[in-house]
Image (cartoon, grey):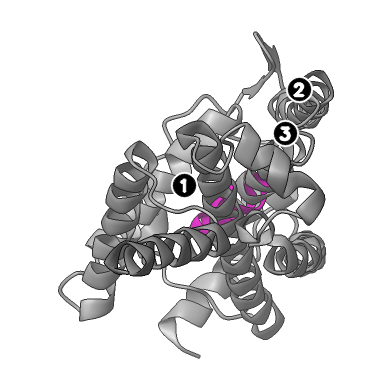
Amino acid sequence: MTTSNAILSTALSIRGGATTSEEYIRSSIDFFNGLRVPAAVLGSIIMKEMYALQNSPPSAMRDWDIENRIDKSKGWRTLRYTYLLLMVLAFCLEANTIFVATQVLTSLATHTMVSTDATELPLELDTDKIGGLFTLGKRDGTQSMVDFLIKNFEFEYTTVRFHFVTGLMSFNIAQALRVRYALRKYSDLSISGMCCMLCVASGALTYTNANTITYGGYLNLMKRQLQLSFNFISRRIHSGPMSAVTAILALLSLYFAIKGYVSPAFSYFELELEEEKEQSNRLKWNRR
């Protein structure tokens, strides 16, 4: 038996011996499967709808867009740009949720342990409280399965929880922007639909904070996951290039997203082609 397997075997004996540890494993498998399956479904939906706002508008809306200069509006371009970025972000987070959950399921099924480098950070949060919308309330009891996961798979546990919820919120906000754009001809209805979608997103986040199991709410979960991710990558900088590449790509993603958000530079390609044709025809006419 390898050292990591021996460590996991020892960890599995906590609070009640082999029978209890098997219950922890079964519960953990159900937990990760419960996130992996909806993440896969959501990812397939995102892939289908990701570029919806980059297509040309229907002919019924094109004249209205040109008349109201929607196609030239920086605000509406930014909305379409934000929709696409939110969908890309949601897809990446859900895909990573699937990958990490699958890896943990394999480890649990084979009783092997993942690297503990990422879980050596001390947990400084108040574990006796859970987060509410504005206040904190006492936790009634200890969650044995969660204790087991935090002890052995904290990086993976925080990653799948944070990425799944964040991906779902990103998808919901993106759909709110899509409703706003689809009903742009009817201002009041579009704002109503957008606010309805945002209400669902904020309500889900409120429920998540009020019923969280660990870390005291979404923001603390995000903080813990980022701490563990930084620790995970920084410890592997010298062992290979992929950790450095991952960090560089993450920074480039943020940099170019901010840069592109400040000055979006895309519109309807068909309209641009029509303008180019009109300009070329004018040049030909002037030459005559």
Residue bearing the label numbered 1: 225
Left or right of residue 237: residue 59: right
Q: Nearer the viewer, mark 1 or mark 3?
A: 3
Which amino acid is tagged 3? Arg
The reply to whether dot 2 and dot 3 touch (C-beta < 8 Å) is: no
Mark 1: amino acid: Gln
Please tell me whether mark 2 or mark 3 is closer to you in this view: 2
First along the sequence among labels 1 and 3: 3
Q: Please name the residue that numbered disc 2 is placed on.
A: 187
Q: Relative to 128, is 39 on the left or the right?
A: right
| Coordinates of residue 159 in the picture (x, y in percent) | 54, 55
- Other-residue count near label 2 (Cα within 10 Å), few / some / many at <14 / 14–19 / ≥20: few
Q: Quadrant of residue 206?
A: top right
The answer to which of marks 1 and 2 sits earlier in the sequence is 2
Q: Is residue 142 above or below residue 26?
A: above
Judge left or right: residue 67 versus residue 234. Answer: right
Q: Which residues are magenta?
A: 153-165
Between residues 165 and 61, which one lies in front from this camera angle? 61
